[in-house]
Amino acid sequence: MKYGIVLFPSKKLQDIANSYRKRYDPNYALIPPHLTLRAPFESSEEDIGKVVAHLRELSKEMAPVTLKITKFSSFAPVHNVIYMKAEPTRELTELHEKMYSGVLEGKPEYAFVPHVTIAQNLSDDEHSDVLGTLKMQDAAHEEVIDRFHLLYQLDNGSWTVYETFILGV
């Protein structure tokens, strides 16, 4: 089964992201707005218990993290993805790094660029238009997040929470 680990921002930030995602993100109905801490990975039902135990230990060691959104940005020209950029704070980067340790040992496929995706799979022209419009808007937002979530993917492609981990508890 496929699993992933994410932070879900506050309802306020999710509502802002969804106002764009409804129109520009084909994954809108499959997963709420989120910040990916660990890219999707495969795990058996037997091994997921070890992953959960590892994540419980990590969550006790880590304090809540500040999510500071600063602007709208893009991964173009590599990918026509538009996102809300989060500052890569020490706490957020450390949390991401720990998601690749212990039983989850591995190396991330991409460098960690903390973000909340709001648009993807756009044509070059649409990407340019949407990003140009968004760059004129203020994206500043800051909040503290005190939990992360282990998700699993259902047969229809949607993601749902397997377990939630409170940071610092």
Image (cartoon, rainbow, N blue to C red):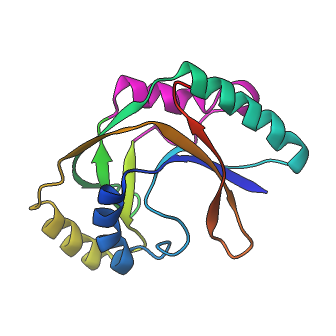
Q: Is residue 71 left or right of residue 89?
A: left
Q: Is residue 89 left or right of residue 57?
A: left
The quarter of the displayed image where residue 93 is located: top left
- Residue 111 lies within the magenta run: yes
| Residue 49 on image: x %, y % | 82, 39
- Is any atom of residue 39 visible in this view? no
- Residue farthest toward the right in the current orientation of the protein: 46
- Residue 116 lies within the magenta run: no
Instruction: Please report the residue visible at 51 percent of the width from the left and 33 percent of the height from the top.
Output: 96
Disc tally is 0
Most foreground residue, 135 or 150:
150
Most foreground residue, 15 or 134:
15
- Is any atom of residue 95 visible in this view? yes
Most foreground residue, 130 or 96:
96
Picture layout, residue 133 above or below residue 95: below
| Residue 69 on image: x %, y % | 26, 45
| Residue 102 on image: x %, y % | 72, 24
Q: Quadrant of the N terminus?
A: bottom right
Picture layout, residue 90 above or below residue 70: above
Q: Is residue 95 left or right of residue 130?
A: right
Instruction: Please report the residue visible at 39 percent of the width from the left and 31 percent of the height from the top.
Output: 65
Instruction: Please report the residue visible at 80 percent of the width from the left and 47 percent of the height from the top.
Output: 43
Most foreground residue, 113 or 159:
159
User: In the rendered structure, which segment of residues is drawn in magenta?
Assistant: 88-113
- Residue farthest toward the front in the current orientation of the protein: 169
Q: Is residue 166 left or right of residue 20?
A: right
Q: Quadrant of the C terminus?
A: top right
